[in-house]
Image: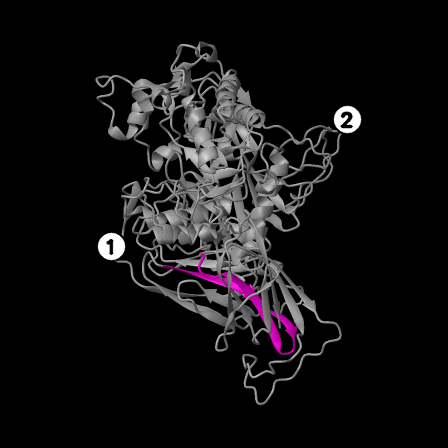
Amino acid sequence: MGSSVRFFPQKPTSDVDQRSIHVSRSGRLPRPELAINRGPPELCRVSHKAKSSFAVVSREARGSSVLRCSTMTVTPKISVSDGNLVVHGKTILTGVPDNIVLTPGTGVGLVAGAFIGATASHSKSLHVFPVGVLEDHRFMCCFRFKLWWMTQRMGTSGRDIPLETQFLLVESKDNTETGEQGDASTIYTVFLPLLEGPFRAVLQGNDRNELEVCLESGDSAVETNQGLYLVYMHAGTNPFEVINQAVKGVEKHMQTFLHREKKEGVDEGLKSLSEGGTPPRFLIIDDGWQQIENKAKEESASVVQEGAQFASRLTGIKENSKFQKNDQNNEPVSGLKHVVDEAKQHRNVKFVYVWHALVGYWGGVKPAAAGMEHYDTALAYPVQSPGVLGNQPDIVMDSLSVHGLGLVHPKKVFNFYNELHAYLASCGVDGVKVDVQNIIETLGAGHGGRVSLTRSYNQALEASIARNFPDNGCIACMCHNTDGIYSAKQTAIVRASDDFYPRDPASHTIHISSVAYNTLFLGEFMHPDWDMFHSLHPVAEYHSAARAVGGCAIYVSDKPGNHNFELLKKLVLPDGSVLRAQLPGRPTHDCLFVDPARDGTSLLKIWNLNKCTGVVGVFNCQGAGWCKVVKKTRIHDESPGTLSSSVRATDVDHISQVASPNWNGETIVYAYRSGEVIRLPKGASVPVTLKVLEYELFHFCPLKEIASNISFAPIGLLDMFNSGGAVDQFDIHMVSNKKPELFDGEASSELTTALSENRSPTATIALKARGCGRFGAYSSQRPLKCTVGGVETEFNYDSATGLMTVSLPIPEEEMYRWPVEIQV
């Protein structure tokens, strides 16, 4: 028999007392007079008169001991009573088993949360722990439907929770503790399954509606019989804040990753290969540049076409013969360096990245390849986790089961990355897109398990990138597992969904909904990348609008000469920059627990912020999604219906942050497709009706009351998808001691323009605006004067809507901000 490693969860090192509480259904406290010693807290079952209860045991220094009992309260707002898990007075789970352990969070950011742990009678490498019954609570979760990627699922009971759930958000409306319905507040509880030592936890449900924790090491020799910090839960009244605080709390607890806000990312510009007014600024050289060896055809005859690329292994760190060049003396030179130099010197590209897999290539590195012997590469054969196999087993594994994967020894993988990246950097490359990352989780046997191997590779990768690419040049792809997410301290950009499949009609609506819901989770760790698209595709405008509100970089993978410049110019400014929103785009509050891909009734709304405005994109995403029966993405409704909904200012969760301190809640709404400008009172909404694959973008501009009869709000570039992204600054300078003049004659509303033409100004609006083209703003009165760049400029004013438009010239400088002054 082989040797095995027993894992015992690491005890807390915080100076603040960490209490491990063993859950009991009785709710009775033990007597306080029992002996213990001081040291790391231990689990203890205390029984009095056959009554099960729970207690905290601490070891006192070398001597007599005293039992310190714990109340049932884990944190002030998370408690266990009669086998029920209660959060903010609302029961989330019932029937909590006796082997479930709760540990309160301690320290800044953790005191409002608690950790779920579990104990077992025997040590194993894989455990499934029921935690409690979840019923009659709406939830939204992100789960891995296949090895590489997550998507969303909504439900109301435990049986609806899929295998491989890595993020769970539960809504609680009713006060089920008292049975009263008077408590109108809604509580949102997030469950984050974590990594503990060499083990990874994940959530799932069963037919008894129980929420379960699946704990596995990925190596049969790595076993445990308990885990104290398997799932972190955090609760509050704002779901976006709850998610944000939960991830920040886990960051402090684990100390193995950094929150997105602390990571230094890449300066993301346009990623296109076109000219004609949308110059490229960022180029990615995708798969196809490396030296690889293909298996003989007869060897791979049994392998399906989809897995064919996994039969290929890396044979060198330099570029292949397609890139080889000769100089004027007919001497060979680096072809990759030539390509990079051409792009930067003659195409004005600023950044060039190249693709490589986490393990070198799809099939890894060829063992003992010439010049690569020192990496100690050996063939490894993947073993997929039960959860992945229960969802959608990846057919590419058939290839690896036949040929194996060339795995660089984890102790040598830094040398591999460093030599690869140093060569790329010498060619002028600025960073890498590291793909096929989740394959590493299947190769943990013999290396201490999946978490240990993943962490070894991630640490080596990030160390090499820090050494060779000073701008933290890394994009993570095919990486939706918590092994890697919770191990990334530097990587700042992550692909948010499965690929854009131009020829698969089932993929487009679910692509948009998946990136939005996945971003609820992924967006706390890295800046989500919503993938490339084709600008000439029939649904290109639909994809473009989503990326405009997604706050992500813009990628196109058009063939040379196949470009829709009219569409690209709605995304990209003439200097090659984009009007990128400030945050990762996420579903609005009222969309969190509905299913806009499958329920046949809901539209998807995605919100984001610009510096001075908010934006809500509305999309009809119905008709297709991942099917657990056929285990693939499919169309389930050939003719989705036309759907209606409404939008309001508060759909932008943080809109008050971009409004003035005394904002009264009134907004100007600009609908991009229809061109409508609406003055919207506080609490009012705007209706929207869309067919499948249709969209609308609503820009919410907080209205500023300058005087009793003058209100103003900048809108932005009216012909750009993210119009409000053009407004970089908004200030008001009042004229000293100026009292606003009264209307001349009768006035029925603020929009009346029958004002004295020679009236003196009340204030000057000072704006900084990016880009060029039609710039719009709302003014309740016709402005007196407008200057752009210090030059008086003509403008148009529509008295019916209050829309003022002025033309901004094409700036000569990149990222230039036009000074625009408007007198009112």
Q: Look at label 2 and name its amino acid.
A: Ala
Determine the residue positioned at 40% across, 10% down. Answer: 370
Q: Is residue 170 above or below residue 58?
A: below
Closer to the camera in the image, 117 or 686: 686
Where residue 165 sits: x, y (%)?
A: 44, 41
Task: Give the CA distance from mark 2 to mark 1.
Answer: 71 Å
Q: Main secondary structure of the magenta part?
A: strand
Estimate the x, y position of residue 234 in percent, counting from the top left: 58, 47
Q: Which residue is mark 2?
A: 61
In the image: residue 673, left or right of residue 6 = left
Query: Residue under circle 1?
Result: 638
Magenta region: which residues?
695-720
Where's residue 28, x and y in %?
63, 46
The numbered disc on residue 80 is: none
Q: Secondary structure at mark 2?
A: loop
Kindly indicate the quadrant of the structure image that contains residue 644. bottom left
Residue 599 visible (yes or no): yes
- The x, y position of residue 216, in whole percent, is 47, 29
Q: Residue at x 65, y 64 (%)?
A: 660
- Name the image quarter holding the N terminus: top left
Amino acid carrying mark 1 in the image: Glu
Position above or below: 316 against 473: above
Is residue 355 shown to the viewer in this render? no
Specify how the rendered protein is coloured.
one colour
Magenta segment: does it hold 450?
no
Residue located at (38% from left, 53% from top) = 567
Secondary structure under tag 1 reads loop
Mark 2 or 1: the one toward you: 1
Task: Tell which of 87 and 757 is nearer to you.
Answer: 757
